[in-house]
């Protein structure tokens, strides 16, 4: 639920309407309960000044009584006293109803906020758990550029220590050290981003980049489980709008599920494919495992549904909540041959769709 700001002209219009009602009520000889129109002021003020609703209702009451005193001075107990009472009741009742409805909306909004916050916390906790499972992969990913830095540093030193130093070789070795340093720092940045707990950042994203970054993080894990990963990424994939950390979490969860499904058979093939279809960007993870049993297909995305002895059953539930918060959908789709295929689709960014 979003709080939308009131239209910019609403406040001046309410102020003018209030003034007009007061002037007509106080200074014209009309025999109608014009002050009843303060009900409109009260009802519209819910959108313009929701926090001051009671004060605005009180102001309308004061203006009604003032106009009555000004217009009926000298003969206070005439027909206009009845009209004044009708107006005051209408204003009081509408003020009370508007205030109750605003308070109910406010409570609903706060509940939705705390639900959103809990979802973010759950997603974060699950990300940190996954990072723990990927510790070996992460260590390997960081270790690779570090080993290369060390080898290039040693080579550079050897070239320098020659009787006639080979400066071109030293320069090339330092260049490689710098680019490997950048690689290592990129890996650490990616892992820190996954471990960090921050509000989702909406930005233009290339799902191919997300797929590659996720695949890099699970590479070692795949090798340990004797799983071959085949990337099939569509060239010039249109961008989607979203949070890169959350989408990486989805892809990593799907890859880990596929890998774990093939554990019992001692490994297999995993496919990660991106493509465009029906005006949406799709990402599919397929495996050559046992597939999804028909009796499980309706519960896959339920929280705490797991057939694994050490599974929490939260991976796919979190994937669905992330994908849907990006305006997308996720489902298990039929697959040719053995195995399962989980596919998500995301709407194109506005500029891409136009
Ligand atoms: N690729 C797949 N092949 C076969 N079954 C799958 C596959 N992916 C998911 N499942 C089934 O869906 C269940 C729920 O998956 P989910 O990722 O939500 O939880 P989990 O992997 O069991 O535990 P975790 O919370 O640690 O991820 C799995 O236990 C498994 O039975
Ligand atoms: Mg899982």
Image (tube, grey):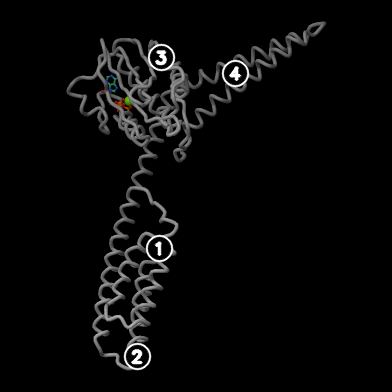
CB within 8 Å, label 1 to label 3: no
Task: Tell me the SS state at disc 3.
Answer: strand
Residue bearing the label numbered 2: 73
Q: Picture coordinates of residue 89 (x, y %)? A: 25, 75
Residue bearing the label numbered 1: 49
State the residue at coordinates (32%, 88%).
72
Along the polypeptide, which appears first: circle 2 or circle 4? 2
Circle 3 residues within 10 Å: few <14, some 14–19, many ≥20: some
Circle 2 residues within 10 Å: few <14, some 14–19, many ≥20: few
Q: Nearer the viewer, mark 2 or mark 4?
A: 2
CB within 8 Å, label 2 to label 1: no
Q: From the viewer's perspective, is 214 left or right of 87?
A: right
Q: Picture coordinates of residue 307 (x, y %)? A: 25, 24
Is 22 in front, or is 54? 22
- Which corner quadrant of the figure contains ligand 1? top left
Is 138 in front, or is 268? 268
Circle 4 residues within 10 Å: few <14, some 14–19, many ≥20: some
State the residue at coordinates (38%, 76%).
22
Along the polypeptide, which appears first: circle 1 or circle 3? 1
Q: Is residue 185 above or below residue 5?
A: above
For the residues marked 2 and 4, what is the alpha-carbon distance in whole angstroms? 92 Å
For the residues marked 4 and 3, what is the alpha-carbon distance in whole angstroms? 29 Å
Q: Nearer the viewer, mark 3 or mark 2?
A: 2
Along the polypeptide, which appears first: circle 2 or circle 1? 1
Residue bearing the label numbered 3: 232
Q: Nearer the viewer, mark 1 or mark 3?
A: 1
Q: Nearer the viewer, mark 4 or mark 1?
A: 1
């Amino acid at each position: 639920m979003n709080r939308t700001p009131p239209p910019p002209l609403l406040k001046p219009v309410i102020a003018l309407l209030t003034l007009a009602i007061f002037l007509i009520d106080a200074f014209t000889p009309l025999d109608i309960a014009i002050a009843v129109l303060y009900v409109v002021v009260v009802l519209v003020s819910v959108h313009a000044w929701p926090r001051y609703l009671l004060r605005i209702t009180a102001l309308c009451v004061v203006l009604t009584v003032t106009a009555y005193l000004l217009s009926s001075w000298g003969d206070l107990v005439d027909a206009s006293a009845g009209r004044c009472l009708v107006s005051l009741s209408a204003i009081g009742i509408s003020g009370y109803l508007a205030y109750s409805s605003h308070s109910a909306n406010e409570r609903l909004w706060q509940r939705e906020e705390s639900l959103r916050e809990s979802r973010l916390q759950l997603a974060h906790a699950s990300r940190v758990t996954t990072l723990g499972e990927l510790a070996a992969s992460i260590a390997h990913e960081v270790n690779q550029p570090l080993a290369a830095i060390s080898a290039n540093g040693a080579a550079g030193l050897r070239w320098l220590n020659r009787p006639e130093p080979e400066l071109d070789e030293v320069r090339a070795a330092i260049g490689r050290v710098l680019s490997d340093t950048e690689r290592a720092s990129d890996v650490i940045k990616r892992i820190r981003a996954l471990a960090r707990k921050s509000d989702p950042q909406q930005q233009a994203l290339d799902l191919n980049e997300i797929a590659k970054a996720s695949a890099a993080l699970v590479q070692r894990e795949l090798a340990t489980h004797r799983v071959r990963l085949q990337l099939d990424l569509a060239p010039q994939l249109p961008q989607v709008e979203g949070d890169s950390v959350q989408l990486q979490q989805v892809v990593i969860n799907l890859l880990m599920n596929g890998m774990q499904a093939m554990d019992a058979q001692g490994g297999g093939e995993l496919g990660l494919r991106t493509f465009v279809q029906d005006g949406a960007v799709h990402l599919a993870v397929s495996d050559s495992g046992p597939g999804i049993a028909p009796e499980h297909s309706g519960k896959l995305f339920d929280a705490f549904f797991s057939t694994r002895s050490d599974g929490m059953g939260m991976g796919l539930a979190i994937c669905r909540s992330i994908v849907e918060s990006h305006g997308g959908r996720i489902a298990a789709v039929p697959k040719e041959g053995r195995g399962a295929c989980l596919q998500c689709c995301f709407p194109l960014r506005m500029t891409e769709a136009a």
